[in-house]
């Protein structure tokens, strides 16, 4: 079962897929961090842990259903030259859901309604977990179908998925805390999720846009913001001298 670990190609496939799973998991961890922030402090870590654990279970479950999963790309309806599949429906539904949730979060933040909503405690633990499950399924289908296209061994996929999710579980609290403490970073993260929503919809409509362009643009934006934060911290010190 693990004979691939004795070959260079097997290790290269594993490392490539692991890196890809971690990168694709950024979408998931940012959404979970932002949506869990709606809960009281005492429940946030628990929600993040449950959310990422569910994501792991969903992905491993899908890996054991590869024969069924590959059928998701088969057309169920045809509109002219456009062939609609179940995968397309999942991506479209997930994209619109992500656009709705992200736009709502941005509106609340801009209008100053975020603190008011948190004080009223509108978000319940069950509602947050249910929203996390929806996004877990969408991101998992996209991630696993990509993995199937990269490697042939299910064992490699399972190891990469489990290792990537453990990595995200370890860093989830740090990422969430950092996003919560810095409003501009949170707005950048929301913008990132907004773009992911558009990409999911475009992919569901068979307009494939390489995510590396989005990741590069967002990485550059985060880097600029980090530099701006460093400059802002140093400015008072210079002024006081």
Image: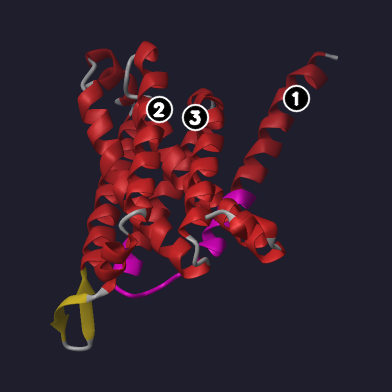
Q: Would you name the residue on which mark 2 appears?
A: 48
Q: Which of the marked residues, 3 or 2, is nearer the chain's N terminus? A: 2
Q: Is mark 3 on a helix, strand or loop?
A: helix
Q: Would you name the residue on which mark 3 appears?
A: 183
Q: Dot 1: within a 10 Å radius of its alpha carbon, few (fewer than 14), some, or many (20 or more) residues?
A: few
- Give the camera-side residue of 172 and 59: 59
Say if residue 102 shows up in the picture. yes
The stretch in magenta equals 201-220
Residue 8 sits in quarter: bottom right
Q: Is residue 3 left or right of residue 146?
A: right
Residue extending farthest to the right is 241
Q: In this view, does 40 lie to the left or right of 122?
A: right
Circles 1 and 3: CB distance less than 8 Å?
Answer: no
Q: Would you name the residue on which mark 1 appears?
A: 235
Circles 1 and 2: CB distance less than 8 Å?
Answer: no
Q: Does the magenta stretch include residue 214?
A: yes
Query: Is the stretch drawn in magenta largely helix, strand or loop?
Result: helix
């Amino acid at each position: 079962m693990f004979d691939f670990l004795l070959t260079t190609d097997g290790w290269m496939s594993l490392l490539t897929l692991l890196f890809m799973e971690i990168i694709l998991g950024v979408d998931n961890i940012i959404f979970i961090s932002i949506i869990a922030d709606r809960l009281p402090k005492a429940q946030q870590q628990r929600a993040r842990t449950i959310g990422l654990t569910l994501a792991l279970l969903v992905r491993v479950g899908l890996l054991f259903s590869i024969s069924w999963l590959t059928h998701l790309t088969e057309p169920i309806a045809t509109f002219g030259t456009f062939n609609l599949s179940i995968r397309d429906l999942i991506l479209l539904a997930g994209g619109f859901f992500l656009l709705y949730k992200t736009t709502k979060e941005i509106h609340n933040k801009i209008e100053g309604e975020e603190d008011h909503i948190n004080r009223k405690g509108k978000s319940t633990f069950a509602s947050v977990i249910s929203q996390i499950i929806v996004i877990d399924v969408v991101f998992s289908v996209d991630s696993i179908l990509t993995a199937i296209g990269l490697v042939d061994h299910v064992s490699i996929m399972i190891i990469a998925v489990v290792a990537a999710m453990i990595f995200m579980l370890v860093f989830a609290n740090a990422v969430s805390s950092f996003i919560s403490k810095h409003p501009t970073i949170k707005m950048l993260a929301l913008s990132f999720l907004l773009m992911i929503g558009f990409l999911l919809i475009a992919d569901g409509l068979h307009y494939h846009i390489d995510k590396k362009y989005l990741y590069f643009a967002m990485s550059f934006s985060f880097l600029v913001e980090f530099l701006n934060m460093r400059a802002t911290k140093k400015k008072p010190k210079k002024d006081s001298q």
